[in-house]
Amino acid sequence: MSQEKENPLQVVDITAVDQKTAEKTLEACTSQGFLFIEGHGISQEQVDELFALSKLFFQLEESEKTKHTIDISNHGYTNYGGENLDPSSQKKGDPKEAMNFACLDFETGLSKKAIHDFFHEDPRRIQLVQDTTKKLYALSIKILQLLALGLKIEDTESCKGVDWFTSRYDPKKDSGSTFRFLHYPGQKSLNPEAVIRAGAHTDYGSMTLLFQKMHEEGLEIYSPVYKKWQAVPFVAADSARFPGEAPPIVVNIADQLSYWTAGLLKSTIHRVKFPKEAQESGRDRYSIVFFSHPNDDTLLEPVPSELIRSIANRGANVESTLLTAKQHLDKRLASTYGFY
Ligand SMILES: O=C(O)CCC(=O)C(=O)O
Ligand SMILES: [Fe+2]
């Protein structure tokens, strides 16, 4: 009998940027707001190295890790309880730690800010971070092109429809994009039903890409389709079709793509819990995440598309005044970390 867990999400092969792939991607983003992508071209070897690097970093002494504590630009290390993703219903912060690389320059793949010494101790570490950052940026650009094709965004004087999103993604200009290592320590003694590892939230950027590992599940979405919590399983790589490639990457729509599309694309609520198996094994969860954001000065206005005009009057952001990407991010970070 198959051991495979049920998967409520579509797995889309994004090798080709064409209308067929665009429509499949759009369909997933307008229903669950979450999907898996394969044909992404990132190797298993690279992902294994990333998880090994992340584990090594989190094994450092607390006093070492806190040398680069998270700052107002969302760059640096945050330890247990430092971040509260659901401040309205949780008093305490989340039981997790994270290392963020923010203020990214996508031509170099480096942060414009200082990075913890650990990543410079061996040049291979920083090269791995840089190379991955550039690849994840390129992948998010590809997905944005697919979404623009799926939405049939119209050409304007200044920009072709297919480039509407990506023209707001100048690699040198400031953005809220962040590359992040996450660690949720296993806690055998806790009641799995009661313990949330990352509180319910939507993401703040335009989309998020996420790597997770086998036997370290815990991510759940509040399905806009089924109106209930659904577990996101680990999906193994299809090595016959994609030799050497890492497993399918989880992609989710975040707030800014929802604003841009008057709510047509779903910025789905999600959280991380201790599943029963993790409770029994006491196993930690490691995940690696890329939050893709447009440039700070981008206005979150509806995109020029008939599909969006036809729903604009019932969209999610109809009553709100238009924000820029940076205004939106600052608002969300302020409540997450208790800034200001
Ligand atoms: O670790 C995960 O699976 C989810 C992380 C997450 O949702 C976030 O950091 O926004
Ligand atoms: Fe998230």
Image (tube, rainbow, N blue to C red):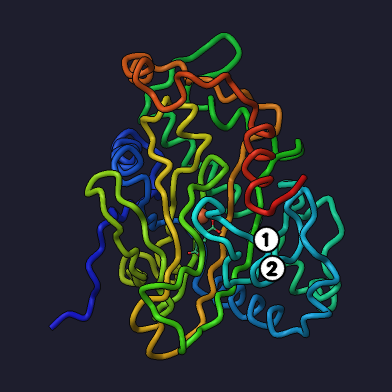
321 in relation to 268, above or below: above
Q: Is residue 118 left or right of residue 44?
A: right
- Towards the viewer: 22 or 267: 267
Task: Report x, y in % for residue 172.
Answer: 76, 39
Mark 1 secondary-structure assignment: helix
Is residue 124 in view?
yes
Q: Which residue is mark 2?
A: 128
Is residue 209 in view?
no
Q: Which mark is residue 131?
A: 1
Task: Report x, y in % for residue 272.
Answer: 45, 65
Distance from Cα at disc 2 to Cα at disc 1: 5 Å
Q: Residue furthest top?
A: 157
CB atoms at circles 2 and 1 under 8 Å apart? yes
Residue at the image position 49 percent from the left and 29 percent from the top = 259
Give the residue type that dot 1 points to. Answer: Asp
Residue at the image position 56 percent from the left and 53 percent from the top = 87
- Towards the viewer: 104 or 325: 325
Residue at mark 1: C-beta within 8 A of ligand 1? no
Give the residue type that dot 2 points to. Answer: Leu
Mark 2 secondary-structure assignment: helix
- Towards the viewer: 308 or 331: 331
4 in relation to 42, above or below: below
